[in-house]
Amino acid sequence: KANELAIQILGGHGYTREYPVEQFYRDNRLNPIHEGTHGIQSLDLLGRKLMQNNGAGLQQLLGLIQDCCQRAAAHEALAPLRQPLEQHIARLTRVTQALLGDLMAGKINQALANSALYLKVFGHAVIGWRWLEQALRAEHGLTDGNPADADFYRGKLQAARYFLTWEVPGCQPELTLLEARDDTCLNMQEGWF
């Protein structure tokens, strides 16, 4: 996404070979090939990984995120960053429980039909947590660190602010579709192509 935006910033010139972002974008297009399809990854996450060891990994992750949010609550300046993440995690947790309940009830196709959307909102939760952790460190750096690094810390805070106030809340439509168990894709018939 960063490479795509870099091309947009440069306008039509961004896609020419005069600027390195064109090469970065082409190189980056290989990542989905190396990683496998996100569809397979999403099916694996929702259909297998979350339930491994009775959900111990998921519970550990949620505990780490909750701990980070509690530490961030001690910093009033971080409230606008922490609150969107907490709201996202609360809604994602409800969606996760419902989808895992569907899987346990044998509604496998319905539960996994929109797993790619689930992967996106889950990923945004994890990245949001990591940005909040960086914001916490930046806050400490501004108060206890080297004053020469203040701009670096302010930059980290601004990047965290962007992700947590723009990207994380941007997952609301996907969460709505997941909550509704939207069956638009599931009900597509081969003959309709």
Image: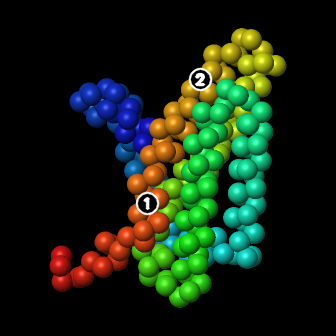
Between circles 1 and 2, the one closer to the viewer is 1
Coloration mode: rainbow
Q: Amino acid at mark 2?
A: Gly
Looking at this view, name the residue that lies furthest to the right. 144
Local packing at callout 2 (Cα closer than 10 Å; few below 14, some 14-19, many 20+) is: few
Residue 23 picture location, percent across and down = 38, 38
Q: Residue at coordinates 69% horizontally, 75% vertically from top-left?
A: 52
Q: Rounded to the nearest whole Å, what is the CA distance between mark 1 and mark 2?
A: 32 Å
Read off the residue under disc 2.
155
Q: Residue at coordinates 61% horizontally, 70% vertically from top-left?
A: 97
Q: Residue at coordinates 73% horizontally, 50% vertically from top-left?
A: 66
Q: Is residue 76 left or right of residue 161?
A: right
Residue 87 picture location, percent across and down = 59, 49
Residue 43 picture location, percent across and down = 51, 72
Q: Is residue 192 left or right of residue 111?
A: left
Read off the residue under disc 1.
176
Instruction: Using the image, tell me which numbered label, if any, was put on residue 44.
Output: none
Which quadrant holds the N terminus? top left
Judge whether residue 24 can be spotted in this image: no
Local packing at callout 1 (Cα closer than 10 Å; few below 14, some 14-19, many 20+) is: few
Q: Is residue 109 above or below residue 172?
A: below
Q: Is residue 78 above or below residue 123?
A: above
**Which quadrant of the structure image shows residue 145?**
top right
Q: Amino acid at mark 1?
A: Thr
Which quadrant holds the C terminus? bottom left
